[in-house]
Amino acid sequence: MYLWFIIVIHSFNSLLESQTEQHDFVCHHLYKSQVIKKQLVSVIWVIASVFIINCPLLPIIIIIALSATFLGFMILDETE
């Protein structure tokens, strides 16, 4: 079980690093508030994945994944 946890965290970190590298090539500047929101969504997904790993039942996985997706989009889509 710990091996899966390490694999998930490592793949999640490598995904974030690759997205950051791709974003740097586009030359967009993120405001501080956008960076904070992006980090918050990352934390939400890490917490959701830990719950999913600890309770691998399909209905629970669906509820947690949909809730995390909705919450992430809600946070990132806020307009100022």
Image (spheres, rainbow, N blue to C red):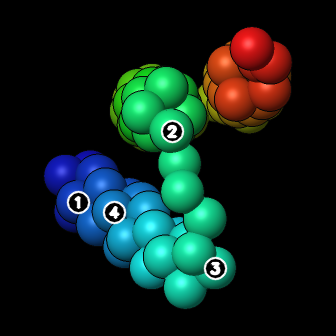
Q: Are marks 1 and 4 in contact (CB under 8 Å)?
A: no
The answer to whether mark 4 and mark 2 are in CB contact below 8 A is no
In this image, 9 relative to 61: left or right? left
Which of labels 1 and 4 is toward the front?
Answer: 4
* Location of mark 2 (residue): 31
* Label annotation for residue 13: 4
Name the amino acid, label 4.
Answer: Asn
| C-alpha separation, residue under disc 4 versus residue under disc 3 | 20 Å
Residue 8 image offset from top left, x and y in percent? 38, 59
CA separation in Å, label 1 and label 2: 31 Å
Quadrant containing the C terminus is top right
Q: Residue at x 19, y 52 (%)?
A: 2
Q: Residue at 45% across / 68% down in the picture? A: 20
At mark 3, the secondary structure is helix
Upstream in sequence: badge 4 or badge 2? 4
Please give the label number shown on residue 6: 1
Identify which residue, 5 or 56, lies in the foreground: 5
Where does residue 45 sit, x and y in percent of width and height?
51, 35
